[in-house]
Image: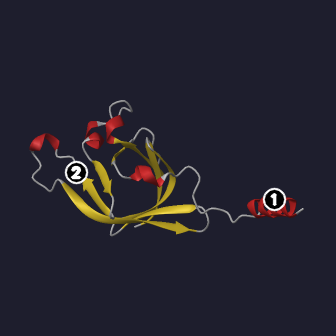
Amino acid sequence: MQTLFLSLMIALNASFATPTTKSPGIDKQYIYQHWVISAKESTKTVTVYRPHRLADSKGVEMRHKHAGMIIKKGGKLRQLRWRMCGNDTGPSGYDYQWKWQTQGVYQTLLVIKKKATYKVLALTQDMLKVEKLSK
């Protein structure tokens, strides 16, 4: 009788478990890589990034392929700038800080300090899709 009662209590606890705050379609472990903009897949409001290693297969333009951003652990982000044919003497990129922020139950935000805040719509090994919220 005690075993039956204990099994019933465990089953009831499992069915009333608190919801997870993990956003569906967002696997944060894949954020740490070199991302480039896929202009063909992006719209006015949503920007799609692809890993640099997939730039050729996804048809990413040269000016985007040799730019992008490298997101590193520890909150470091390096935004790269395309230097066409070596004629541009400006900096090769800019350094920023970034962090995750959760808003509400399922909304994941990527906050790049001094740049913008982005709502993450999807994050997989092969795609980062964001919507810019603010500067």
Q: Is residue 37 left or right of residue 45?
A: left
Q: Is residue 16 above or below residue 36?
A: below
From the viewer's perspective, is 20 left or right of 67?
right
Q: Residue furthest right?
A: 1
- Residue 50, image x and y in percent? 39, 42
Q: Which residue is mark 1?
A: 7
Task: Specify the color scheme.
Answer: secondary structure
Where disc 2 sits, the SS reads: loop
The residue to which callout 2 is attached is: 81
Foreground mark, 2 or 1, reads 1
Q: Viewer-proximal residue, 92 or 6?
A: 6
Viewport quadrant of the C terminus: bottom left
Q: Nearer the viewer, residue 135 or 49?
A: 49
Give, as a three-letter code, the residue at label 2. Answer: Arg
Residue, x 36% and y 65% (percent of image)?
A: 98
Q: Are marks 2 and 1 in contact (CB under 8 Å)?
A: no
Crowdedness of circle 2 by 10 Å Cα count: few (<14), some, many (20+)?
Answer: some
* 53, 44: nearer the viewer: 53
Which of the 4 image quadrants contains residue 71?
Answer: bottom left
Res 7 quadrant in image: bottom right
Question: Please, what secondary structure does the residue beneath circle 1 have?
Answer: helix
Query: Which residue type carries mark 1?
Result: Ser
Residue 132 in the image: state x and y as whole percent: 45, 59
At x 31%, y 57%, the residue is 72
Residue 134: x %, y % from top left = 44, 66
Label 1: few (<14), some (14–19) or many (≥20) C-alpha neighbours in 10 Å: few
Q: Position of residue 124 (x, y in %)?
A: 48, 45
Q: Which mark is residue 37?
A: none
Whole-angstrom CA distance, mark 2 to mark 1, is 60 Å
Q: Earlier in the sequence, mark 2 or mark 1?
A: 1
Residue at 56% over, 49% down? 25
Along the viewing direction, whichever of 74 and 12 lies nearer the viewer: 12
